[in-house]
Image (cartoon, rainbow, N blue to C red):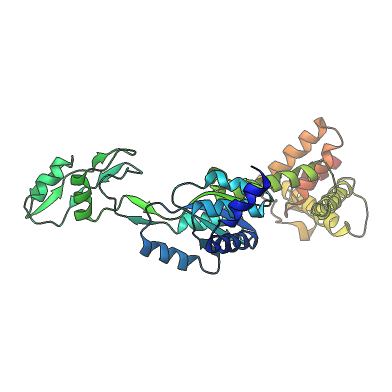
């Protein structure tokens, strides 16, 4: 098209359309995220309620599709990709929230609604078992006609079992629409269906936005835990693992000191406690009270289970390398009764 023809075409655009495109362009450019929503089948009253509920979080703007497309072209910057989703009865929605938050909000705002004759069922339609609350009359025949297991019992019309009356994707008949309306069954959801949203230079579609937030959070937490464990096990210091690594190193050093019975000021209380436990264990093993000092007579041996664990540890340490021994000793030192010392003192007297 020549420049003169383009100019003549521009001159024929009514002023109200130019103003509308300018307002739409300003709308698109004023939000961090802009999307296209499907408005098909939403009654005007419910649409007004939805707009009111979105106030302060998102804004809905409706216009002719041709003007919406023109405004998207005016803004450019990649947002014109949304033109592929502009068809039928649609509107623009703008928000400063992220696309995932917008999608979640729109899905949560959907409400159930009755379905009319000629509409396509979005899901399988089931008439549930139970008392319909309708007095005996012709309605029982209408229920049976649409496939419901209905009978007159106990003075009212009852559905004797859950009755599947229509498959998803099938058209609703006049008879079924009347029955569902009489029973107050609303098998469809009404709300703003987000077709696509543009944010940060990317177009997101619904299947990319429909994430399970709890599952996603759990995955992130699991990954963070695994990364921390890897850092600790590899002795790779980071801001988050340095404290743990230092604590582990201090524990290992203490275990080595206790295993080697190094007379260090910080280790003396533990060494004395272990020696005391070993002494009591030895005294309890001697049957002749006359052979014991008075203060050790009648001393009870440490609990059997910790002593047994200590014995297993000492026996296994003979077979393991010296690097593993401090770890075993460290585990034994955590026992308050110091049962591992009994075996060590016994070995000294053996």
**Residue 103: percent from left, percent from top:** 53, 53
Horizontal relation, residue 3 to residue 265: left or right: left
**Residue 211: percent from left, percent from top:** 55, 47
Residue 2 picture quarter: top right
**Is 293 rendered above or below residue 2?**
below
**Is 154 rendered above or below residue 311?**
below
**Residue 316: percent from left, percent from top:** 77, 34
Disc count in the image?
0
Nearer to me, 232 or 196: 196
Camera sees residue 291 = no
Nearer to me, 157 or 254: 157
Horizontal relation, residue 302 to residue 322: left or right: left
Residue at x-position 18% and y-position 42%: 148
Residue at x-position 83% and y-position 39%: 325
**Residue 250: percent from left, percent from top:** 86, 52
Residue at x-position 6% and y-position 52%: 137
Residue at x-position 70% and y-position 42%: 309
Quadrant the N terminus occupies? top right
Horizontal relation, residue 282 to residue 168: left or right: right
Camera sees residue 197 = yes
Nearer to me, 246 or 291: 246
Quadrant the C terminus occupies? top right
Residue 161 picture quarter: top left
């Amino acid at each position: 098209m020549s420049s003169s023809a383009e100019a003549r075409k521009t001159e024929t655009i009514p002023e109200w359309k130019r103003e509308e495109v300018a307002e739409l362009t300003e709308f698109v450019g004023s939000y961090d995220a802009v999307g296209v929503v499907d408005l098909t089948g939403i009654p005007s009253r419910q649409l007004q309620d939805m707009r009111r509920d979105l106030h302060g979080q998102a804004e809905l703007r409706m216009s002719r599709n041709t003007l919406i497309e023109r405004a998207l072209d005016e803004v450019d910057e990649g947002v014109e990709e949304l033109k592929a989703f502009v068809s039928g009865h649609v509107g623009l929605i703008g928000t400063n929230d992220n696309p995932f938050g917008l999608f979640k909000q729109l899905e949560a705002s959907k409400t159930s609604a009755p379905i009319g004759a000629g509409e396509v069922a979005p899901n399988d339609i089931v008439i549930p078992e139970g008392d319909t609350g309708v007095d005996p009359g012709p309605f029982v025949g209408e229920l049976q006609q649409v496939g419901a297991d209905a009978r007159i019992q106990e003075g009212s019309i009852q559905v004797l079992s859950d009755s599947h009356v229509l498959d998803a994707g099938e058209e609703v008949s006049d008879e079924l629409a009347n029955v569902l309306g009489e029973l107050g069954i609303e098998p469809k959801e009404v709300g703003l269906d987000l077709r696509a949203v543009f944010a940060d230079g990317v177009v997101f579609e619904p299947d990319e936005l429909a994430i399970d937030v709890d599952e996603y959070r759990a995955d992130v937490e699991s990954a963070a835990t695994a990364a921390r464990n890897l850092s600790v096990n590899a002795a790779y210091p980071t801001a988050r693992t340095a404290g743990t690594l230092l604590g582990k190193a201090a524990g290992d050093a203490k275990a080595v000191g206790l295993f080697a019975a190094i007379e260090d000021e910080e280790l003396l209380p533990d060494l004395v406690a272990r020696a005391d436990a070993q002494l009591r264990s030895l005294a309890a093993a001697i049957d002749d009270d006359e052979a014991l000092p008075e203060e050790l007579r009648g001393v009870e041996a440490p609990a059997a289970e910790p002593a047994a664990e200590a014995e297993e540890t000492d026996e296994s340490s003979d077979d393991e390398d010296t690097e593993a021994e401090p770890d075993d000793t460290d585990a034994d030192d955590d026992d308050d009764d110091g049962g591992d010392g009994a075996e060590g003192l016994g070995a000294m007297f053996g």
